[in-house]
Amino acid sequence: MTKEVFKAILKLKGDVSMLIVDHNLDLALALSDRALVLDRGRISHLGPAAPLLKDLDYRHEKLWI
């Protein structure tokens, strides 16, 4: 089911704006142009998604994972 939903999101990408909230971080970041990270109700990151996907040290710094 998850694969089907993300395939549909990929087809719509570029045509409409979307907000993805998901536990599959790698897949969500791969589909995203920008990422917004909330930490205890505050924005701790707002910017391109690619660095969070590709740089695990940066991801650990921003997401604590």
Image (spheres, rainbow, N blue to C red):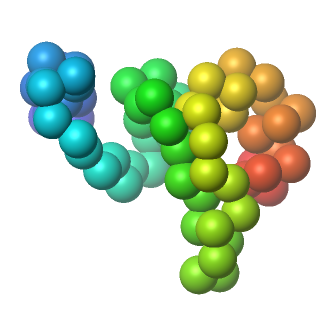
In the picture provided, is 8 more to the left or to the right than 38? left
Where residue 41 appears, as percent x and y from the top left, is: 59, 81
Q: Which quadrant of the structure image shows residue 55?
A: top right
Residue 63 to residue 28: above or below: below
Where residue 13 appears, as percent x and y from the top left, is: 22, 24
- Front residue of 18/8: it is 18
Asked if one can make out residue 59 in the rendered structure from this viewpoint, the answer is: yes
Q: Which quadrant of the structure image shows residue 17?
A: top left
In the picture provided, is 14 more to the left or to the right than 34? left
Residue 43 to residue 45: above or below: below
In the picture provided, is 15 more to the left or to the right than 20? left
Q: How many labels does the image show?
A: 0
Image quarter where the N terminus lies is top left
Residue 51 to residue 25: above or below: above
Q: Which quadrant of the structure image shows residue 56?
A: top right
Where residue 28 appears, as percent x and y from the top left, is: 42, 35
Asked if one can make out residue 53 in the rendered structure from this viewpoint, the answer is: no
Which residue is farthest bottom? 41
Q: Residue at x 62, y 51 (%)?
A: 46
Q: Which residue is drawn at 36% across and 54% down?
A: 21
In the picture provided, is 45 more to the left or to the right than 32? right
